[in-house]
Amino acid sequence: MLNRGLIVLFISLGVVFLVWSLMYQFPGGLDPKEKRDKKELTNSDMQKTLDQPSRYTGRQINIYGQVAKDPEYDSEGTHMQVYLVSGANDYYVVADYPARLEKDAGDFINIKGRVGDTFIGRTDDGLELKTIRVTAATIVPSTPEKVLAPAIKVQKTKMKRVAGYVSITIDRVEFADFETRFYVKLGNQGTGPAIIHLFNSYVNNDGDMMSLQPNQAAGYKEIPIDLPAGAQDEGVLVFPAMKPNTPIKLILGISGAGWERELKFDLIK
């Protein structure tokens, strides 16, 4: 008969082998597929989700989009076509929400929920639309930036310059695939108005001179040209896409009664 020491040794070796086997098959304690299935799908995952919808049914989503047309309502809730952007690609999905939710075409929203089945229908232009349904748990307001040009990097600066009685602060810079956004705060502590010369403002990005881009289409809040006495305001300056880790200098012109200045912001040196 085996003595007690050998029995303990065999049991110990068996436990070690079992633990090693589990770690080998499930590193980190979870099957890689189970880990993958717990990850939320975002806008960047839409192409593969549309290519193989049955594979992703039931997966959690966290997406940003724009309501493409006025929603439809019935006894089961709210149904809306939603326009999504991911890099150079854009998509439509159909979102179902289990209650009446007042939204309008053009609204920017964030949807959290799960991937449903395939939807086949038509757009307002009469084109066939084959996409996925999304069962929404929550639909909340979002912003044009997050929907149309999500930031790939955010550089907080809070750099302040003062000209006369006017202060201008660059709160942060957001780098996106096709544009760069400067978030600006302004204050006029004087007794007279000031003028912000946006038309001749520019950025020196590592030797490349870049002019201001119009931002009306995206719906970003615009910087006011006229800043009355005592006013405080804020807005977004939009320039072409820049590389986050290269030197960036923003130049803004400003003037008041009898004076004119050019403010320089060395945001990234």
Image (spheres, rainbow, N blue to C red):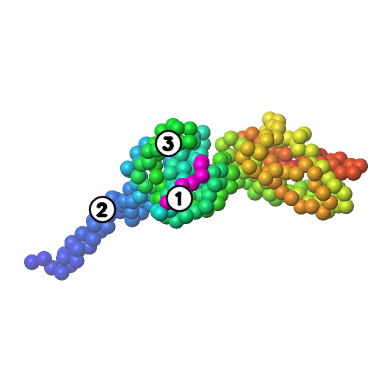
Which element is circle 3 on?
Answer: strand
The image quarter in which residue 242 lies? top right
Where residue 22 appears, x then y in whole percent?
27, 54
Please report the residue visible at 49 percent of the width from the left and 54 percent of the height from the top: 101
- CB under 8 Å between discs 3 and 2: no
What segment carries the magenta color?
A: 66-74
Please report the residue visible at 43 percent of the width from the left and 44 percent of the height from the top: 94
Nearest the eye: 87 or 143: 143
Please report the residue visible at 46 percent of the width from the left and 39 percent of the height from the top: 92
**Label 1: few (<14), some (14–19) or many (≥20) C-alpha neighbours in 10 Å:** some
Where residue 236 appears, x then y in whole percent?
68, 44
Which element is circle 2 on?
Answer: helix
Amino acid under label 2?
Ser
Q: Of the residues under marks 2 and 1, which one precedes in the sequence?
A: 2
The image quarter in which residue 259 lies? top right
Mark 1–mark 3 Cα distance, whole angstroms, equals 17 Å
Which residue is identified by label 2? 21
User: What's the mark number on residue 122?
Assistant: 3
Which residue is identified by label 1? 73
**Label 2: few (<14), some (14–19) or many (≥20) C-alpha neighbours in 10 Å:** few
Amino acid under label 1?
Tyr
Q: Residue furthest bottom?
A: 4
User: What's the mark number on residue 59?
Assistant: none
Nearest the eye: 89 or 127: 127
160 vs 178, left or right, is right
- Residue 200 belongs to the span the image colors magenta: no
Mark 3–mark 2 Cα distance, whole angstroms, equals 52 Å
Q: Of the residues under marks 1 and 3, which one precedes in the sequence?
A: 1
